[in-house]
Amino acid sequence: MKKIKFGCHNFLNSKPILIPLIEKNIRNLEIIQESPAVLASLLRRKKLDLSFVPSIEYAKNSDYLLVNNISISSLGAVNTVLLTSKTKMEDIKTVAADNRSLSSIVLLKVLFKEKFNRLPFFSHTEPDYEKMLSTNDAALIIGDNTFSFERTGKIIHDLSQEWFQLTGKPFVHALLCVRKEVELDQNIIKTILKSRDEGLASIEQISKDEARTLGITKEKCADYLKYKIRYTLGNAEQEGLKEFFSLAFSHGFIKSKPKLNFIGDDN
C-alpha cells in the first residue's frame, strides 16, 4: 500500500491536529514535521502529497487544491507572529525575518505598504532573535520561540492584531493543500478533520504536556490554543484570505489573485 506523505509544521498551534493523528498510527499515512518554509519547499518539489503550508504558498502555486474547513488562523492578537523593534514602526529601515516564515513576511510587507507606503530592507536569517536585533532595526519572529522571548524594553507589534485593525478580518496563517495530481482517499481527509476535533476536545491535556516542553504555564498554553488560534476555514477565514491575496497582489508580492479551489469541487 502506497503511503500518503503528509506534512505539518511542528509548532504548538499544530498539536491539536498532530497529536491525535500520530496516536492513530495510520498505516498508509507518513507524517513529516518541518518548519512552514521547508514544508512549502517539499510540497513544491513533490516530496509531499498534502501538507499544511503558509497561506501565501497557495497563492503562488496553481497546482494545489485546498482541504475545506481546516486552517491555522487567528482573529486579533495571536502572540506568536511578532515584529519586535528598537524604534517606531514608521522609522524602521531594516528587518531581519525568521527564515522559517513565508506568509508572515508578506503580511509584514503588506502592512508597511498600507500604513506607510514604503518597504524597509528585508533579510532572511536563522531565528536568533538577539543577533537579528543587534544588526537590524527590527526582527520578525514566529512560532514557539516567541513564548520565551524577552519583551521588556522592546517595541512589539502583533502582526495578526495589526491585520485585524487594518481589515477587521481573520488572518489565515496556514492552509492544508493537496497537489492536484495526487489521488487522495477521502478517508484521509476525514481522519485529519476528526483528529483536529479530538485534539480540540483534549486541549487541557495537550496544554499540560506541551507547557512542560515549552517552559510556560498550562494556563498560557490553553489560552493560546483555545482563544488565539482558529482551526476552521469558514466564510470569515475565507474572506480574510481573499483580502490578504488581494492586497499582496495589489502591492506586487504575488503575480495573480488565486481562486479558492477545494478538493472535491468541480474545478
Image (cartoon, helix red, strand yellow):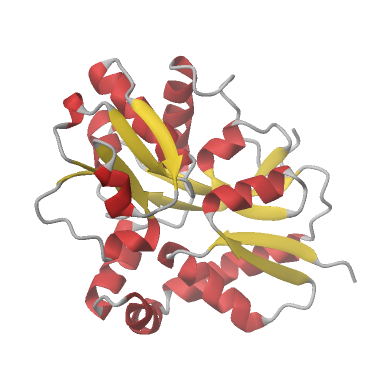
The residue under the point 25% across, 45% down is 134
Count of numbered labels shown in the rendering = 0
The answer to whether 139 is drawn above or below residue 148 in the figure is above
Q: Is residue 266 left or right of residue 175?
A: right
Percent of width and height locating residue 208: 34, 84
Q: Of all residues shown, which one is farthest toward the left?
A: 153
86 vs 111, nearest the viewer: 86
Evaluate whether residue 78 shows in this view: no
Percent of width and height locating residue 152: 11, 56
The residue under the point 49% across, 17% down is 252
Asked which quadrant contains residue 212, the reply is bottom left
Percent of width and height locating residue 81: 33, 49
Percent of width and height locating residue 215: 29, 77
Q: Is residue 232 left or right of residue 111?
A: right
The residue under the point 53% across, 52% down is 36
The residue under the point 58% across, 70% down is 194
137 vs 192, nearest the viewer: 137
Evaluate whether residue 108 shows in this view: yes
* Quarter of the figure that contains the N terminus: bottom right
114 vs 184, nearest the viewer: 114
Asked which quadrant contains residue 214, the reply is bottom left
The answer to whether 168 is drawn above or below residue 74 in the figure is above
* Quarter of the figure that contains the C terminus: top right
